[in-house]
Amino acid sequence: MSTRFRFTLGATDGRARTGTIHTPRGTIRTPAFMPVGTAATVKAMLPESVRATGADILLGNTYHLMLRPGAERIARLGGLHRFMNWDRPILTDSGGFQVMSLAALRKLTEDGVTFSSHIDGSKHMLSPETSMEIQRLLGSDIVMCFDECPALPATPDDVAKSMRLSMRWAQRSRDAFGDRPGHALFGIMQGGVTPELRQESASALTAIGFDGYAIGGLAVGEGQEAMFGVLDYAPGFLPADKPRYLMGVGKPDDIVGAVQRGIDMMDCVLPSRSGRTGQAWTRRGQVNVKNARHADDPRPLDEDCTCPACTGYSRAYLHHVFRAGEMISGMLLTWHNLHYFQELMAGLRGAITEGRLDDFVADFHASRAGGDIPPL
Amino acid sequence: MSTRFRFTLGATDGRARTGTIHTPRGTIRTPAFMPVGTAATVKAMLPESVRATGADILLGNTYHLMLRPGAERIARLGGLHRFMNWDRPILTDSGGFQVMSLAALRKLTEDGVTFSSHIDGSKHMLSPETSMEIQRLLGSDIVMCFDECPALPATPDDVAKSMRLSMRWAQRSRDAFGDRPGHALFGIMQGGVTPELRQESASALTAIGFDGYAIGGLAVGEGQEAMFGVLDYAPGFLPADKPRYLMGVGKPDDIVGAVQRGIDMMDCVLPSRSGRTGQAWTRRGQVNVKNARHADDPRPLDEDCTCPACTGYSRAYLHHVFRAGEMISGMLLTWHNLHYFQELMAGLRGAITEGRLDDFVADFHASRAGGDIPPL
């Protein structure tokens, strides 16, 4: 734990940029995509396989882990890295988003949120102080401030009130986090789709001072156009020398558009969730392996992909094991999807470094324009 | 495909023996345990991981594969090895056992069995001739004769009639198989627990002549004592220079007892099925990871085991992911169980080679006598 947490900027191309986040547990190449390991596992994957796809960092969910197996238990067992056998960086969310989307009997006050577990109905409390404590017990490398996400639709007034509560909670998170060398605390900008509120939130956060800044309250169903609208200006409100993290994004074209607009970090369950439901993401668009047209197709998902699913198996096999409900279906498709997402990130980083991001993005859209490849 | 199929005997220790089965797709060290890949996958495992446990050969199920995805389809796609990405030997059963245990609306005649698929109700027919054709389409290295398994309980007269039908089917299987260099056909001895019927069956099979001989009709609920009773004499009825395969066995102590009695090959779903239900097999007995006593246990399943589950994870983690319903639970426990079974086979082969099988078996039973290790 000798290295302190720091971010170094690399190349820029337009508003897009590359960089490196240095942590005691290793470096994170940005723009970075973080696979989600909700319950101390990236579903259907062994951690060495996640690493093999090119992932530098995972995301863990505070809400899920505090309920099962419990943060104190994980701390007694040596922390989340050891528990889940992943020795590289882990970012944990604050629990704020999940408590609003999953928990029952929520009660929100200035102090925090009381709620009942969706697993066993047990009563719990999350506040800036308890969220910081839980993330400390987990041993998270990048800790997120506890914030509040208003349910949509929300009026501008609701969004403003919620954002200001989150900013007071950001100060309490900062105070509770204290000084933990080698560990980082990120603030979360809120403010919906209103530039003035986004600016107010960014000013409040930068006045407090964080190691990185997330853009929250997007990827909650507002659509890509509205999200890109916010990303056209919001990253500019944040310090250029700190990482900018867009939470919960997204589809490949969301990722490309976000990177073009200056985003450094993203996370999403999409590649792993899609993999378990028979959906593959490829350079040439989506492939639904459950479709009968694949039943006799000897070709791989993507002829040019080097992942185990594409080098070892036909579409016919992937179709068969999905239909038969075999676990290898989710294992192979999740691996492929994570591989594709990481390859996309590597492509974006290379294009930015070489100053050819516009061409890369044009090729990205052109290769997908035809959609799925035609049947034999 | 230049190597012909042949079996070479190695060391002997009492009735136990080591050997090597040579096939064009690689050698099989005997005594061998064959993991079961029912639907063209060993459940919860990638084939390279199955190989890493030490498996030389897999078993595939004719009944399942003929129904889904279909033998003709697999043949069009290049055969079962290519389809499931396993280039080493595959033994396929004949479908006879599964058609009696899984299919609906069975009708048995001298010609064969007509039945309805348990998947979609479609009508099918299995006979010695169709079973040979399906196993040829799959590209099986070791093909099993089509036989009939009487439902238990059965009278000695029922068992005798069924055995004699199976012997007529064995001749038809031999005729239909023809001459296929590099591929082997095994006969299956029946006759229940009656020595005279077992002798009659063995004589009928050896008169026809096969590349190996299975002992069928055991591991169907008769209990270990009755099974060992048959194994005390039945292997002696078979040619010593051909492999002897005990179908559907078994638990580790079944395997040890069978090897002591001269068995060369076995298969069972137990290690993979147990792995998916939270049961681990170890040198020190069974461990049920779902038991609450493991929730805080930082120790691995087995301190001396080198499998990924034991080198990377605590019992507490395995307990957590089982409780949370995560796929990694079945993935890790299946890997551990297959590793343990293959390690047991390697231990048996080493002990036979060094003439210390009795000591090995005594240690095997002593280490398990204490049952599961005590909680912390």
Image (cartoon, coloured by chain):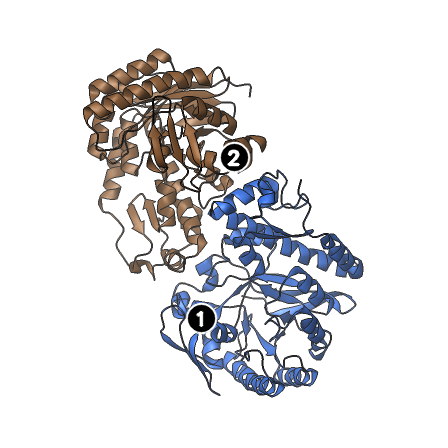
Chain colours: A blue, B brown
At mark 2, the secondary structure is loop
Q: Do we see residue A240 in this rendering?
A: no
Q: Residue B86 has which mark?
A: 2
Q: Mark 1 points at which residue?
A: A137
Q: Gap in Å between the C-alphas at discs 1 and 2?
A: 44 Å
Within 10 angstroms of label 2, few (less than 14), some, or many (20 or more) residues?
A: many
Q: Do we see residue A42 in this rendering?
A: yes
Name the residue nearer the viewer: B263 or B268: B268
Looking at the image, which residue is at 45% across and 76% down? A133
Name the residue nearer the viewer: B336 or A105: A105
* Labels in figure, total: 2
Does residue B14 sit above or below A181 in this rendering?
A: above
At mark 1, the secondary structure is helix
Name the residue nearer the viewer: A181 or B87: B87
Q: In which quarter of the image is the N terminus of chain B?
A: top right
Specify the amino acid type for callout 1: Leu
Within 10 angstroms of label 1, few (less than 14), some, or many (20 or more) residues?
A: many
Looking at the image, which residue is at 45% across and 20% down? B184
List x then y, in percent, for residue A85. 47, 56
List x then y, in percent, for residue A257. 71, 65
